[in-house]
Image: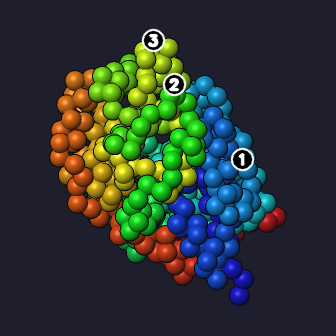
Amino acid sequence: MSKRKIAVVITARPSYSRIKTALEAINENPDLELQLIVAASALLNRYGNAINVIQNDGFKVSAKVFSLLEGENLTAQAKTAGLGILELSSVFERLEPDAVVTVADRFETMSTAIAASFMNIPLVHIQGGEVTGNIDEKVRHAITKLSDLHMVASPKAYERVVKMGEYEKKVFMTGCPSIDIADEILQKPTLNFDPIKKYGGVGNDFDYKSGYIVVMQHPVTNEYGDARKHVEETLHAVHDLKIPTFWFWPNVDAGADGTSKGIRAFREDHDVTNIRFFKNMVPKDFLRLLKNSQCLIGNSSVGIRECAYLGVPVVNIGSRQSGRERGKSVIDVQYSKIEIKNAILKHLEHGHFLSDKIYGKGDAGRQIADLLAKEILTFHKILRY
């Protein structure tokens, strides 16, 4: 019996950590063959060279899809999605996968869903059914309706997917694969590397061993015109507190250019000796850095998911994660320097929280691979004429 060919499409830096343990489990499953496709910003140095991290972890890349249109605005997002459909349809025709896996809710993932669906290839969606405060929610729900199998991360997500009319026997609550990595970190949490020596980054050296914070703030696509103003509030708050800070550059969303310009301008006008900026870290290093931090500030979903499991305090800014299930470790604030500072200080006084397993228990990757191997696939391979 031939192996099932499973094509997994990774389009951006955060998507890799969201699927890594499932990739490992697919590789280890004797009934599955992994076809890994890396696309869009995951191929670019500007956004952290996720392709290098993926290959250094030992994964074989079956195809690269250069589809990202520069611009960091709504038009560029729409055109990138269109280019993705064109390129991925050719890749799927060549690879002939038995199923295609798409991850989460970024705008580029819509290309994967549309190409696979129109080519009659079974589509598997990881992390559907969640609610957030920007365009990602529309993308996520649209992909859910295009998908044939659903691997969701939480009980409420499961309920939403079923209520959307999806066949209940095709919806599975696996948890989030990134929690698998967080579970490994929780077992051995010591910060066993020097972030500055290993990853370089940009900025002054500082002593982080007595305590530090982490910032990861992305633009909100339906508020992208305010991206620079939003990030400036966070910059002022972090600068005023003078706490050693590891700050990560934003994703390639509409408004990312405004966020980046805000950071660069702030660095020119202020003495930011307490902030060092990074593009990317391998998933385990990043989560280990988070686990040993005093607090995460920003609007990344890592603050809602992985930080809940790790017990890391989070200051969640703005609307980007509104609607997502969250643990007690999260304080929600608006784009206000004063609110951000007060929330950070409150977390510093409280310290870490108990682990919250709302997004999984550390075995999602294995569950996903097992389901991919045994579930009946609704459609068939690409038709040949």
| Residue beneath the point at 39% across and 61% down | 189
Name the foreground residue: 28 vs 195: 195
Q: Which residue occupies the extreme bottom position in the image?
A: 1
Label 3 or label 2, whichever lies nearer to me, is 3
Residue at 63% across, 53% down: 53
Above or below, comparing residue 113 to residue 280 in the picture: below
CA neighbours of label 3 inside 10 A, class few (<14), some (14 to 19), many (20+):
few
Q: Amino acid at mark 1?
A: Val
Q: Which mark is residue 380?
A: none
* Residue at the image point whose x is 72% and y is 83% from the top: 2
Query: CA gap, disc 3 to disc 2?
Result: 14 Å
Is residue 127 visible in the rendered image? The answer is: no
Which of the two discs, 2 and 1, labels the residue nearer the N terminus? 1
Location of mark 2 (residue): 260
- Return the residue at label 1: 65
Instruction: Name the residue rendered at 56%, 73% in the picture.
Output: 25
Describe the element under mark 2 as helix, strand or loop: helix
Q: CA distance from mark 3 to mark 1?
A: 39 Å
User: Which image quarter is the C terminus in?
Assistant: bottom right
Foreground mark, 3 or 1?
A: 3
Q: Earlier in the sequence, mark 3 or mark 2?
A: 2
- Residue 368 position (above or below residue 189): below
Mark number for residue 269? 3
Q: Amino acid at mark 2?
A: Ser
Point out residue 134 in the picture as x, y percentages from the top left corner. 39, 37
Marks 2/1: CA–CA distance: 25 Å
- Give percent across and percent down for residue 215: 39, 37
Badge 3 amino acid = Asp
**Considering the numbered disc 3 on the image, is that residue within a helix, a strand or a loop?**
helix
